[in-house]
Image: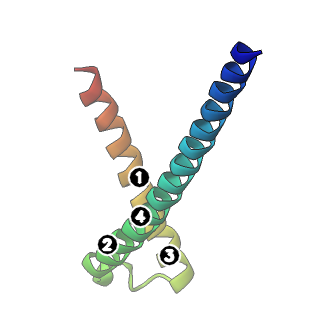
Amino acid sequence: MMMYITNQYFLFIIQINTKNNMDVKIRREQKMKNSLIQNREKIQKAIMAIFQDEVQTLSSDLQSILIDDMVTAFYNRLSVMKKIQDRN
């Protein structure tokens, strides 16, 4: 009987730790996502400021699309470079 209680107690502790770890992981992922969104917006504003003269002939919709594409390309290239660096 004592062994059963001990096992149940340890299973309970494991469940609590697993739930806490998942909660921490979810909060960390949400924080990272918010950070990426903020960084993306900063990069978009910076690129728009840099290329303001070049893109002013485009409509505002096309400007937004172009800037978003440029930021996406930047993040994709950065991801590839990080993977290459991790291999070495």
Q: Amino acid at mark 1?
A: Ala
- Which residue in the structure is indicated by mark 4? 35
| Circle 3 Cα neighbour tier, 10 Å, few/some/many (<14 / 14–19 / ≥20) | some
**What residue appears at the point 28 percent right and 27 percent down from the top-left corner?**
86
Q: Give coordinates of residue 56: x percent, y percent.
A: 39, 85
* SS at circle 2: helix
Disc 3 to disc 4: CB gap under 8 Å: no
- Which residue in the structure is indicated by mark 2? 47
Residues under labels 2 and 4: Cα distance? 18 Å
Can you tell which of label 2 and label 4 is closer to the viewer? 4
> Is residue 5 shown left or right of residue 75?
right
Q: Nearer the viewer, residue 33 or 68?
A: 33
**What residue appears at the point 38 percent right and 72 percent down from the top-left corner?**
44
Residues under labels 1 and 4: Cα distance? 18 Å
Q: Amino acid at mark 2?
A: Ile
Q: Nearer the viewer, residue 43 or 55?
A: 43
Residues under labels 3 and 4: Cα distance? 20 Å
- Give residue 73's mark: 1
**In terms of sequence position, does the residue under pointer 3 or pointer 4 come before the other?**
4
In the figure, 15 relative to 76: above or below?
Answer: above
Residues under labels 1 and 3: Cα distance? 14 Å
In the figure, 86 relative to 72: above or below?
Answer: above
- Which residue in the structure is indicated by mark 3? 64
> For residue 12, which quarter of the picture?
top right
**In terms of sequence position, does the residue under pointer 2 or pointer 3 come before the other?**
2
* SS at circle 3: helix
Q: Amino acid at mark 3?
A: Ser
**What residue appears at the point 68 percent right and 19 percent down from the top-left corner?**
7
Q: Amino acid at mark 4?
A: Ser
Residues under labels 1 and 2: Cα distance? 12 Å
